[in-house]
Image: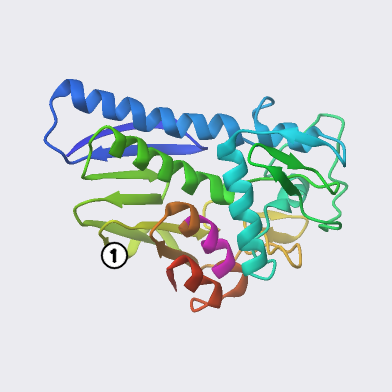
Amino acid sequence: MKRRAQPALGTLVEISIGDDLDEVQSQAAFRAGFAAIHAIHQLMSFHAPDSDISHYNHAAVGTIIDIHTHTAKVLAAARDLYQQSGGLFDIRIARQLVAWDYLPAPLPDISSDNQYGNAGEMYSLPSAAQVHKQADDWLDVGGIAKGYAVDCAIAALQACGVQHACVNAGGDLRVLGQAQTVLIRDPRQPHSMASQVQLTGQAMATSASYFSRKGSAGKMRSALVHPLTGTSIADQHSYTVISPLCMWADALTKVIAASGNAQHPCLRPYEAEAFII
């Protein structure tokens, strides 16, 4: 198994290739996989001033913004899961994350004013390469785009003829081909492992608050936000989802975290299963 790692998506991304490729073939595959990861990062980063997401967040209500088709796919998927989950997945939580200092304000002179609420209609997608901003909201697609980037990297590896691989973006991962064993952290002691699963041609993602949890204004906060209440999910549990696509595994962990229900009915449309530790 050949492995390479690069920083991207706010984490360390590792690509492992199990095929018996020569050096030229393997290097070409690694380049293609990481290029796919970096492309999604550039398109959908909350921090990059020239990303599609930054263009949306800076735009006035009523603006129609040209976006890449990759971004349009992620925004369409996020809207679909928002509807399927009854609002338990919502990428319009960026304003709350800014208020808690997990994200910077989109512009230096803009404050989140610490008021939570996603009033108004969700964005619409008038074409496969446009988004219509219909409310005064800020988007953060970190809870779904990382999984999508993993899926894109897998597709890039397949296009290079790779049949056995794993792409792991900080715990959001997908296995191609032969089975691989994946370890899951103990949420109470995150430097220890609590469980393991074997994946074959599947994706897995885990969300938890153990690395982002912090005290603020007398309350315990984390980067996990309950979209319906604006409160923080800062418990000592982890929420894991297994699905055919990493995009859905990544996003559905937030639904499970917000609902506390590992049998949530919106898992079924995405052929997903979940468990809570």
Q: Name which residue lies at 47% across and 41% down.
A: 149
Q: What's the magenta bit mostly, secondary-structure-wise?
A: helix
The outermost residue toward the top is 24
Q: Position of residue 96 (x, y in %)?
A: 76, 52
The furthest residue to the front:
127
Q: Secondary structure at mark 1?
A: strand
Q: Is residue 18 visible in the rendered structure shown here? A: yes
Q: Tell me where the magenta segment starts and ends, as one range.
A: 250-256
Q: How is the image coloured?
A: rainbow
Q: Is residue 188 visible?
A: no
Q: Quadrant of the C terminus?
A: bottom left
Q: From the viewer's perspective, is 115 left or right of 50?
A: right
Task: Give the residue at x 76% y 49%.
Answer: 123
Tell me if 166 is positioned left or right of 47 in this view.
left
Q: Residues within 10 Å of mark 1 (few under 14, many from 20)?
A: few
Classify 164 as above or below 108: below
User: Which residue type carries mark 1?
Assistant: Val
In the depicted structure, whether residue 200 falls above or below residue 71:
below
Q: Position of residue 30 (x, y in %)?
A: 30, 29
Q: Which residue is mark 1?
A: 197
Taking the spot 16% from the left edge, 22% from the top edge, the residue there is 23
| Residue 59 coordinates in the image, percent (x, y) | 82, 34
Question: In the image, is residue 254 part of the stretch drawn in magenta?
Answer: yes
Of 71 and 173, the residue lying toward us:
71
Q: Nearer the viewer, residue 211 or 5?
A: 5
Viewer-closest of 159 and 24: 159
* Image vertical order of residue 247 relative to residue 239, above or below: above
Q: Nearer the viewer, residue 14 or 194?
A: 14
Q: Quadrant of residue 220?
A: bottom right
Q: Relative to residue 20, is residue 91 drawn left or right?
A: right
